[in-house]
Amino acid sequence: MHPLIWLAGGGVLLLLELIFPSVDGLLIGGVAALLLSAVTALLPLAAGLQLILFSLLFLGGYGGLRRWSLRGRSTPDVLSEPGAERAEVIQAFDERGRGRVRWQGQSWAAELMEPSGQSGPRPGEDVTVMGRSGNRLQVLAALSRRTSG
């Protein structure tokens, strides 16, 4: 295959990564295609060998990134000291008890562990991080707010 095909394919995958950031592998596939474009521009390779090389680059990149991200994980699914972490509400909680908080410098989806049916904590207020379920934090409203409301 021509190097421009790999270049265009890599560009499309990177564009898709910008549009759908939650889909795993688009960034790695785009980078693998761009690398393969450079390799095929320098060395004429058979199409079958190019596909094998792309697969190896993609799987190696995906596996390496996955391994690196698991190694760097500092927060277990259940926090070691419940109630020790505070987060700031950045998007108000809805009637289902879902909102967004800033925790450890990052924006997280959050869910109140005790939804009251009323409006939850408002932006700027603190909540207590009790644990994590996937990529959603389990939080409690600040103690002073729960006892006064």
Image: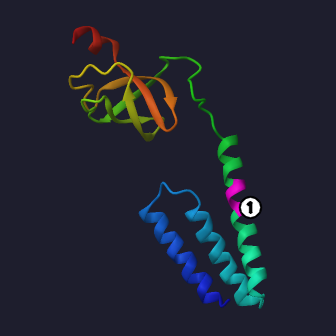
The N terminus sits in image quarter: bottom right
Q: Position of residue 97 (x, y in %)?
A: 31, 28
Which residue, as the protein is rendered here, is positioned at the far top? 147
**Tally of numbered tags:** 1
Tell me what residue is drawn at x 48 percent, y 54 percent. 22
Which span of residues is magenta-colored? 59-64
Q: Is residue 62 part of the magenta span, yes or no?
A: yes
Tell me what residue is drawn at x 57 percent, y 76 percent. 10
Tell me what residue is drawn at x 63 percent, y 77 percent. 34
Which residue, as the protein is rendered here, is positioned at the far front? 48
Q: Position of residue 125 (x, y in %)?
A: 29, 26
Q: Is residue 14 part of the magenta span, yes or no?
A: no
The C terminus sits in image quarter: top left
Q: Residues within 10 Å of mark 1 (few under 14, many from 20)?
A: some
- 127 displayed left or right of 54: left
According to the picture, the residue beneath numbered tag 1 turns out to be 60
Q: Overall secondary structure of the magenta stretch?
A: helix
- 82 displayed left or right of 42: left
Tell me what residue is drawn at x 47 percent, y 68 percent. 16
Q: Position of residue 29 (x, y in %)?
A: 61, 68
Task: Work out whether residue 79 or residue 98 is closer to the camera in this orientation and state it.
Answer: 98
**Rendering quarter of residue 119:** top left
- 30 displayed left or right of 87: right
Q: Secondary structure at mark 1?
A: helix
Task: Work out whether residue 102 or residue 37 is closer to the camera in this orientation and state it.
Answer: 37
**Rendering quarter of residue 18:** bottom left
Q: Amino acid at mark 1?
A: Gly
